[in-house]
Amino acid sequence: MRQTIGLYSGSSDLAAILSERCPDCMIATAPSDADACRVVVVDVDAHPLEAPRKALARVVLYDGDAGEPRRPGDLRVAREVFIAHPMDFIDAANDLAETVMHAAQLEMEVDYLKQIHELMQMTDAPAVSERITRTVLQILDLPLGTLFLHDPRLERYVVSFTNDPEVRETGEFLPGIPPDVLQRALASGRAFAADRAAGMIVMPMQIEHDLIGVLRIALGPHDGVDEQSIVNVTQYVAAVSAVVGNIYQLTRSRDLAMRDDLTKAFNRRFFEAYLDEEIERARRYGSLFSVIFLDLDDLKMVNNEYGHLAGSRTLQEVAKRILGAVRGIDKVVRFGGDEFCIILPQTDQEQAVAVAGRVRKALVSATFHLADNIDVSITASFGIATYPTHGITKDDLIRQADAAMYRVKSTTKNAVGLAVVQDARAVRR
């Protein structure tokens, strides 16, 4: 491959001489082309010249006295000496550029290793995701990005970090990323695909054959990414994928210990600890949150008619429908038996009523197909309490939500009850 040398000169004779005596080089004389070269020649009539942005080495020519002081990256040589043997000086400049590039690569790899060491000390997945995403954006010199990580509970990819206001949780398997762009990235050999029509760069994060995450970087119509940045970012993503995988597995192991074996919803032990944390967070920051208690109506009839195995299958399907109707940050808990609880961070009572309505509709939208010739319909009674409106302690919130739910269950069933502050009566919606 012929190397391109940038030339800054007011005379055409130098370009002709270089083309003749340096047959392995292409000579770029247009400023836009010369500015992109890592090695440039600066003629005497181009002095003084600010260092081209991407030039790593410059052959600076002079007549008589060298004049201005030498700057880093300069090879200063008399014009007539250079013209006699230009390739010798271009080769020396190339060696200097290679040394600079190698040093920069080593420095970058040291930075990566340092960051990987720091990431390995972190167990907070969102913080790790933010650090990785912002580093990728810095390498590519682009402003907006999102890291999606696989959530085995939901069997899809969810936003772990984003600073892109256009990114939304949609419930899709991989929100906002066209399958063909992802496939192109996976098949590229370096896990990188830029699609200007789709307005994004896609970078998969893999551990062996498992796709644990996907980076989506917004790409505007005038944004550009050079080849060296692509090389750097793919090396970085490959290096940190192992760290993300380890954190993913650690989080997954802890997560499984806090889940109900049957439904895969969180268990009572998780509920007790997490509700304490949510109360403390709301108290500290002056925020609010809501809890929804729901109890299945007449599950006992399913057990009596079809057996306890059918009842267990019903609970599994109920949990799936609840999880599909809430946000990724909401926590679904199997409180006990056929009773579930949903913890809704930063959610007021009106928003909680809307969430309960979605869950109720999800339960009644279709029958539960449990086996051949076994289809059942299940409804639930709901009770809602909001911090601090209906209680400021864990026991108060549980009691209020539970009482509201049982008032619904003892009257209409298949409805939503809201705790009331003073008399604690439920308001059916």
Image (cartoon, rainbow, N blue to C red):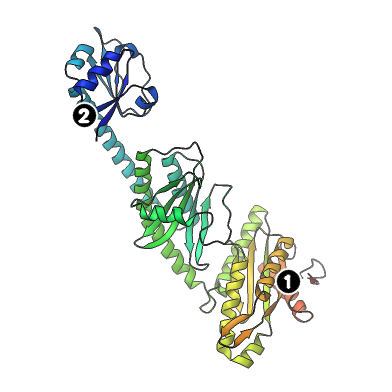
Query: Is 301 drawn above or below residue 329 in the view shown?
Result: below
326 or 339, which is in the foreground? 326
Q: Is residue 113 left or right of residue 167?
A: left
Upstream in sequence: badge 1 or badge 2: 2
Judging by the rendered image, the residue that carries numbered circle 1 is 400
Residue in the foreground of this view, choosing between 211 and 21: 21
Residue 163 x, y percent position in the rendering: 54, 47
**Is 99 drawn above or below residue 335 in the view shown?**
above
Residue 6 % position (x, y): 31, 24
Residue at 68%, 76% (x, y): give it: 364
Q: Quadrant of the C terminus?
A: bottom right
Image-quadrant location for residue 349: bottom right
Figure check: 103 above or below 200: above
Answer with left or right where residue 370 lies relative to residue 185.
Answer: right
Q: Read off the residue under disc 2.
A: 24
**Quadrant location of residue 92?**
top left
Q: Could you tell me which quadrant the N terminus lies in? A: top left
| Nearer the camera: disc 1 or disc 2 | 2
- Counting other residues with Cα less than 10 Å from the Cα at mark 1, is it few (<14), some (14-19), or many (20 or more)? many
Q: Quadrant of residue 422?
A: bottom right
Q: Please say whether residue 147 is visible from this viewpoint.
A: yes
Residue type highlighted by circle 1: Gln
Q: Position of residue 218 (x, y in %)?
A: 50, 45
- Distance, label 1 to label 2, CA atoms, is 82 Å
Q: Secondary structure at mark 1?
A: helix
